[in-house]
């Protein structure tokens, strides 16, 4: 596990939006196409991976985010201990999928920062920095999107009305948070 500082020391609060880092949460990238891959993942995660574009499936402990026809990000819904980089879920998936050549399992926990954004004006801020049309996205709970926000690649997951998770690469996270805070202050 990387020894890193949190991107946001304290929750960012503006009148129209709040942003906080959700950390530490395990994030695993899964890739595979074979029928055995889907069966194995379903048994290990106790959930079915979403196969429809820009959707997600959620259980009480995990969320699976569709990234492409053969790629998903698995995110824990629970915060884990900061002093470990050993994740039982990763080891279980790696042993049953990667080692058996059914697909690929990669731990991307330290690569992505997970931000939770809340507020009525989230989509106004996003529209200022993204070419993506958020009209359908904001109507469907559980929808996902990969887009560019202020020239930075992000993954968005619509959790609930006016609440979403944003995944951004760690090296761009501080800059993106500053941009969001600046945009929110202008609303």
Image (cartoon, grey):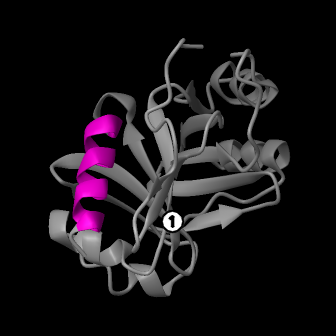
Q: Looking at the image, is 93 positioned above or below residue 186?
A: above
Residue 70 in the image: state x and y as whole percent: 48, 48
Q: How many marks?
A: 1
Could you tell me which quadrant the N terminus lies in? Answer: top right
Q: Which residue does the image show at 76% across and 28% down from the upper left?
A: 96
Residue 138 in the image: state x and y as whole percent: 43, 81
Quarter of the figure with residue 109: top right
Q: Looking at the image, is 28 positioned above or below residue 152?
A: above
Could you tell me which quadrant the C terminus lies in? Answer: bottom left
Instruction: State yes or no: residue 177 in magenta.
Output: yes
Q: Quick one: 110 or 57, which is closer to the camera? A: 110
Question: Is residue 158 at least partly visible in the picture?
Answer: yes
Q: Which residue does the image show at 69% across and 24% down from the upper left?
A: 94
In the image, which residues are magenta?
A: 173-185
Q: Looking at the image, is 133 positioned above or below residue 14?
A: below
Q: Quick one: 24 or 39, which is closer to the camera? A: 24
Instruction: State yes or no: residue 163 in magenta.
Output: no
Quarter of the figure with residue 102: top right
Q: Looking at the image, is 55 positioned above or below residue 70?
A: below
Which residue is labeled 1 in the image? 164
Q: Which SS class for mark 1?
A: strand
Residue 4 in the image: state x and y as whole percent: 50, 17
Decide whether the magenta segment is chiefly helix, strand or loop.
Answer: helix
Question: Is residue 33 at least partly visible in the picture?
Answer: no
Q: Which residue does the image show at 75% across and 24% down from the upper left?
A: 87
Q: Quick one: 15 or 3, which is closer to the camera? A: 15
Residue 119 in the image: state x and y as whole percent: 47, 74
Q: Quick one: 108 or 162, which is closer to the camera? A: 162
Q: Which residue does the image show at 61% across and 37% down from the upper left?
A: 23
Query: Dot 1: few (<14), some (14–19), or many (≥20) neighbours within 10 Å?
Result: many
């Amino acid at each position: 596990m990387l020894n890193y500082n949190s991107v946001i020391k304290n929750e960012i609060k503006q009148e129209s939006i709040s942003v906080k880092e959700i950390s530490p949460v395990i994030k695993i990238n899964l890739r595979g196409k074979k029928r055995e891959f889907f069966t194995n993942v379903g048994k290990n995660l106790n959930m079915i991976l979403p196969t429809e574009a820009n959707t997600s499936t959620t259980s009480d402990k995990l969320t699976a985010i569709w990234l492409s026809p053969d790629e998903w990000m698995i995110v824990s819904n629970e915060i884990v201990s900061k002093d470990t980089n050993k994740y039982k879920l990763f080891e279980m998936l790696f042993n049953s999928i990667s080692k058996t050549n059914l697909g690929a399992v990669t731990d991307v926990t330290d690569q992505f920062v997970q931000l939770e954004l809340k507020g009525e004006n989230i989509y106004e801020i996003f529209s200022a920095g993204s070419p993506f049309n958020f009209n359908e996205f904001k109507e469907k709970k559980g929808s996902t999107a990969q887009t560019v926000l202020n020239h930075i690649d992000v993954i968005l997951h619509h959790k609930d009305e006016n609440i979403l998770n944003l995944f951004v690469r760690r090296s761009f996270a501080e800059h993106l948070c500053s941009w969001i805070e600046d945009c929110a202050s202008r609303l």
